[in-house]
Image (tube, coloured by chain):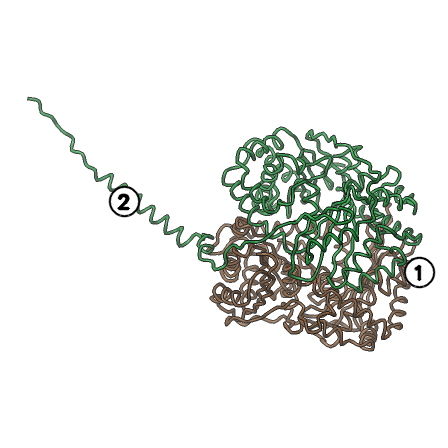
Chain colours: A green, B brown
Amino acid sequence: MVRRYYHKTSYAWVWKLLALVFAGWVVYWGYNRFFVFDPDDILKKSVLKEKNFNTEVAEVTSPDKKIKAYLFRDTTNPIISISFLFKNAGVASDDEKHIGIANAVAALLTEGAGGMDGLRFKEELERKAIGMSFSANLDDFTGSLITTKEHQDTAYQMLNAVFGEPRFDEQDIRRVKAQLLTVLKQQREHPASILELAAAKEIFGNHPYSRNPAGTEKGIGSITRADLLEFVHNHFTKSNLMVGIAGDVTEKEAGAILDRVFGNLPDNGRIVFVRDGDTVFDGRVKNISYPSAQSVSEFFGRGVARSHPDFYPLYIANHIFGGSGLSSRLSLSARENEALTYSIYTYLSLLDKAPTIRGGFSSTPENFARVMEIVRREWQKMGREGVSEAELEQAKNYLISSYNLRFASIATIADILVYMQKDNLGADFLQKRNDYVRNVKLKDVNRAAKEYFGSNDTVFVNIGNFGDN
Amino acid sequence: MQQTIRKVFLTVILTVGIMFLTERASAAELFGMREFRLDNGLQVIVIPNHKAPIIKQMVWYKAGGVDEDPGKGGIAHLLEHLMFRGTKKVKDSRFNEIISDNGGDSNAFTAQDYTSYHEAVDISKLELAMFLEADRMQNLKLTREVFEKERGIVFQERKQVVENNPVSYFGEAMRRTLWQEHPYGRPVTGMPEEIMKLRLADAQDFYDRYYAPNNAVLVLAGDIDVETARQLAEKYFGPVPAGKKIPQTAFPKLDKHFKGRLEIALPMIESPRVVKMYAAPSYNTDKSVIYPLSVLAQYLGEGETSKLYKKLVLEKKAALAVSASYDFAARSYGSFIISALPAEGVDPDDFEQMLEEAVAESVREIGRDGIEDIKGKMLAGQVYLRDNPNDAAYVAGAMSSIGMSVRDIENQAEYIKAVSYRQVAEAADALFSSAPSLTGILKPKEKK
């Protein structure tokens, strides 16, 4: 007979284990419930809920001259803001002989028009609380007008006169030239602005983007009244104009405003197109010795245009990398964890002919090399590993929920309307934009990360003390 | 964060605010703000603005650089940074992360008279932002590790913002010279050697002394009605216990005969500056002259139609720019500042004389018509202040924090209207003849 010995199986250990797991879960749950803050607890019970916000933009065409514009109607206050842009009329298009002329025109346009000299013109603006300003960036010439409903007629008439009959009185030209030459001096007074100009030279070489946006001594010095008038005639035309109107205006009124303000502009002008940039991103570092308390860095990598299919994926990758303020990877590493710098950031620079990923930081000399090492390490890591699902989620949450914040002032809204046209985003962009962000997939972001952070190198341009002679 | 602002920056904002006051609003208030107080002493200001479903929350503590003990320069600012580094409940520096996960922007700044924390959020996230501000009003938890990190960061901030910028450096030297023993003479960032000596206990001490609902103003500007704001303020800030009696900082009086001159030559400077700074009356020292002085600043040097601009830039061609500004929103003295860029080839010392004469001449020329015209400009466009809730929160918050009543904030247009040209002339005489003042000259140092 075979005796079988059965091992008597006890399941007690299973129960013990289960009890232990359960107890662990209770502790974990309790800890989270009572000791870890969960923002959703508050949001779920919040009496303030999300609201529908009508961001409809109308496409307006003026009845007479068929000038097009985008209109965002907001009747909260009796005020109107108009932003406009003359495409390709910026500093990079300045005539070789008169570098700085776009900037000089911007400074001189409020110095009188028609029968009003500079002083009377400015008196009138102040008396009627009309804000009028012009500026030239590298690509375009831009301007803005803000007025109360009460004084809108005067405002439109004055802006129209600026385009049609700018004064450019000799004494104003002399004074503004002297002011601009002083700006050139002031640019040389602190390291960050010296660096900015040097970095443009290093990155863009012979391309017009390497120009000092304020102009050159020779260029400013050579500008005459005739040059200014020629600039206005060639650059302020209907064919390169884009207009955004925000505020207490109906579509019909907006059409009439367009004819009144911009109707007399010539149809076409003579515009110099700027060639594509040809920056080489090869990992080089240029150090400029300068006796300053902190050394300052600007760094660059290849970017994409606003209209490029990679724009949103790269925008998100950059947000995570260095675009999101104190929560970005760069900020967390260099500032929050190691306390090496006060600010470190990157952004997508959207110059028409040479988009880049651009960043900067400043730090005392003993920390500087370490911060640079962190930027490089994170840059390579972004190229190699991309971002995680959680980071993507977080970035999307911010980009989507923060979108309404940009509608705080009508002047900003008018600017957005102009850029919607410049970047061909369409009149329904404000309704679609959050979906563009929402629809970006992890693989898109990581492909863009690999493409722009991975296969490319950076260029660093630094100023300060580097321990050399 | 975050930013450190000096009084000069506030001046700009306030003068912009004042430029946009208006005539169309005979009875109109500047912002349409409403005020109430919780039992724990928290002052709440609500500025409804329904343009977009967004809101700006600002919490202003009536404590800043002036409240620091001697040798503890920079502690108010360092504490501002530490306020983002965790409380008993919201641990591990999660504040920014939580706000940004919810689409909000948060920041803070420290000034001499106050410290302000603010969030811009979609209206649906306001309660979260309110919870977080109420939480850090009472539950801040400091650790040595984050303290040391933030101390390093504010040290870097000072190097970046002040020492890497010769014009800021000059401004700091001017304030130190004019204000001398008065705490307005100390930089909000603290001096570098002071910063590195600060200790965790100093931050805790400053927090315990000054951070309490009875020493704070909550501003909510945006898509909210007053009743909802009241309920939510009660819900989140109501339970925060009032602090013990808040110590009041006593301000020394300046020597009224002080007329100083400071010349700084720096090798990197290429374009000289001339600045005149006056220790002027403020809302808290002499309310009766603040509107005459505001009109005076506008008359002398706001914009390119002002008297000094006409005389020095357009007629004499001695300057490329000149401006005047006046800040009355201060706990102690206010400040009146005239600054100019002498033209190429004009010696800054000679220019100082010309500026002096131009100011005296302008004061003599103050007349009824001219002043009515100036007032008209100041009153035009008040309605712009109702556009951006962020600006409204800032201006209203800064003014409330120095103790200005809601009535006085809202009725500024009326007060300006009531100013007579004689009052302007008298205020000008008093300011230029007997206020403590400093003339500062920043010029190039000859390179060897």
Q: Residue under mark 2: which chain is it in? A: A
Amino acid identity at mark 2: Ala
User: Residue B9: x and y, percent?
Assistant: 71, 59
Do callouts 2 and 1 point to residues on the same chain?
Answer: no
- The numbered disc on residue B316 is 1
Labels 2, 1: front one? 1
Can you name the residue that lies furthest to the left here? A1
How far is mark 2 from mark 1, CA to CA? 92 Å
Q: In the rendered image, which quarter is residue B346 located in?
A: bottom right
Residue B409 showing in the rendered view: no
Residue A440 higher or lower than B350, as above or below: above
Residue B322 higher or lower than B374, as above or below: above
Marker count (numbered):
2
Q: Nearer the viewer, residue B58 or A458?
A: B58
User: Residue B330: x and y, percent?
Assistant: 69, 68
Q: Residue at x 80, y 77 (%)?
A: B420
Residue B323 showing in the rendered view: yes
Q: Please, what secondary structure does the residue beneath circle 1 have?
A: loop
Amino acid identity at mark 1: Lys
Q: Is residue B93 left or right of residue A15?
A: right
- The numbered disc on residue A130 is none
Figure quadrant of the C terminus of chain B: top right
> Neighbour class for label 2 at 10 Å: few (<14), some, many (≥20)?
few
User: Residue B288: x and y, percent?
Assistant: 73, 77
> Neighbour class for label 1 at 10 Å: few (<14), some, many (≥20)?
few
Q: Residue under mark 1: which chain is it in? A: B
Q: Please, what secondary structure does the residue beneath circle 2 have?
A: helix
Residue B429 higher or lower than A349, as above or below: below
Can you name the residue that lies furthest to the front here? A63
Identify the residue position indicated by label 2 in the image.
A19
